Amino acid sequence: MENSGDNLSQFDISKEEIDKLVGEVIRYILFKTHQSSGCPIKREELTQLVTKNYRNRLLPAFIINEAKDKLSTIFGYELRELQRSRPSSASQARFSQQSGVDAKSYVIISQLPAEVYKKYVEDVNTSHLTGFTFVVISIVHLAGGKIAEESLWHQLKRMGLHEADENHPVLGNVKQVLETLVQQRFLQKDKVNGPEGTTLFYELAERALDGPIVSSSA
């Protein structure tokens, strides 16, 4: 821990207490990422882990930064803050369907080389989800970064994926898997009013715009 003596003096807290808090934050991040299938973690959740017993308002940011360093050096993960992208339509404030993710939220991304990650970390039981994610994001990207829901399902049906299919042999509930991509911030939904009524669009969200899809999966 760099400059730990100087940093600890401003918090009136021991190194042991700091280490314990950092450990709690790291465990929470790893457990929550696994439990929620990689959905973003709100900064508020991490802050509450610290402030439940300590009141110094600067302490949460310090602990999160320390956890970020250890996740990188020990576990090989980057703790990346998501910069929330906004729907492109002018009616976004009123009609955008947000996924409930706070503007300040985090995901962990493997820093391991692709071949090492694939050999030692990648779960073959979830590789089909990575494939589905790649296909959907590719469709939206080729449509210019935004596609109407009806058009997206039209493209997916050509691959044998149907909106009403709740028992796909590989994906299970296909519509639910698509919704998971919204929760994970690969996609975002935007309702737009037009002459023929309201149309639901899917747009690329920050995780799809931020880098390779495979490396974004913890």
Image (tube, rainbow, N blue to C red):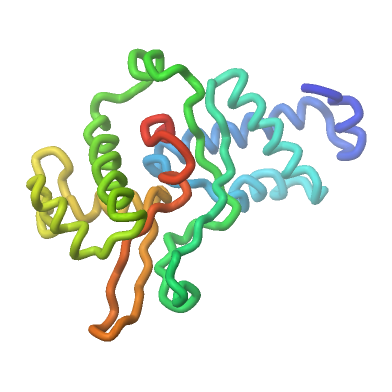
Specify the quadrant that holds the N terminus: top right
Specify the quadrant that holds the C terminus: top left
Q: Is residue 60 left or right of residue 87?
A: right
Residue 196 spot, x, y in % from top left? 23, 84
Residue 132 spot, x, y in % from top left? 24, 41
Residue at x-position 34% and y-position 59% = 146
Residue at x-position 47% and y-position 35% = 31
Picture mark count = 0
Q: Is residue 134 left or right of residue 211?
A: left
Residue at x-position 19% and y-position 65% = 150
Residue 188 spot, x, y in % from top left? 39, 58
Which sits in the foreground, 127 or 22? 127
Residue at the limit of the structure toward the bottom, as seen here: 195
In the rendered image, which quarter is residue 13 located in? top right
Which sits in the foreground, 119 or 198? 198
152 is higher (above) or lower (below) than 159: below
Residue 112 spot, x, y in % from top left? 47, 19
In the rendered image, which quarter is residue 138 located in? top left
Q: Is residue 67 left or right of residue 56?
A: left
Residue at x-position 41% and y-position 45% = 208
141 is higher (above) or lower (below) than 123: below
